[in-house]
């Protein structure tokens, strides 16, 4: 079930227990937390705010919708990017590598990717070289497959 407020434009999915102060925020299903600010996505329990005790919380973001067909590398339509250039390649069937201009530190990087096909799984993480790894596989047999990314949203935040 989807709950939304016409006044604030916030989207709060079913089961979320949150306090939201701002507009245009998206809250995932079943999470608990506090959101202060505009245009924020809360995908796990926690507090998201641009400042704590007056000190700015620094983060950089890369948000893109990825599409991949055939044996081509994924193409990215960037929604937000203050991290820098990310170059996408296909390393093998259902496996893709995003190489940022400056490698990410996995300890201070948040990665979230959505699934767009109910018969497939999509995962993303930062590898030891600081690159983005995306894997798509079939839920039956777990074989890695191409052409699953279809306007799939990837969000990366560094702190």
Image: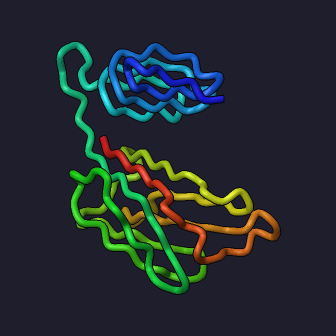
- Residue 82 in percent (x, y) is at 21, 51
Residue at horizontal 51 percent and vertical 35 percent from the top: 43
Asked whether, in this view, residue 148 is left or right of residue 99, the answer is right
Which quarter of the rendering shows the N terminus?
top right
Give residue 104's quadrant in the image.
bottom left
Residue 51 position within the rendered picture, expressed as x and y whole percent measured from the top left = 24, 21
The answer to which quarter of the image holds residue 94 is bottom right
Residue 24 vertical placement versus 5 (above, below) = below
Q: Nearer the viewer, residue 66 or 87?
A: 66
Residue 86: x %, y % from top left: 30, 67
Instruction: Report the side of 78 relative to 35 (left or right).
Output: left
Residue 34, relative to residue 103: is it above or below? above
149 sits left or right of 140 in the view:
left
The residue shown at (46%, 63%) is 127
Q: Residue at x 38, y 74 (%)?
A: 88
Front position in the image: 110 or 127: 110
Q: Is residue 97 above or below residue 27?
A: below
């Amino acid at each position: 079930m989807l709950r939304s407020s016409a006044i604030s434009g916030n989207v709060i999915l079913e089961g979320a227990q949150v306090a939201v102060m701002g507009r245009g925020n998206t809250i995932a299903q079943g999470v608990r937390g506090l959101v202060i600010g505009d245009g924020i996505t809360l995908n796990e329990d926690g507090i998201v705010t641009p400042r704590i005790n007056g000190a700015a919380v620094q983060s950089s973001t890369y948000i893109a919708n990825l599409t991949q067909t055939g044996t081509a590398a994924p193409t990215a339509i960037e929604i937000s990017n203050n991290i820098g250039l990310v170059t996408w390649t296909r390393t093998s069937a259902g496996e893709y590598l995003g190489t940022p201009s400056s490698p990410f530190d996995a300890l201070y990087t948040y990665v979230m990717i959505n699934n767009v096909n109910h018969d497939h799984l999509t995962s993303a993480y930062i590898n030891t070289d600081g690159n983005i790894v995306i894997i798509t596989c079939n839920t039956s047999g777990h074989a890695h497959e191409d052409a699953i990314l279809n306007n799939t949203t990837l969000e990366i935040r560094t702190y």
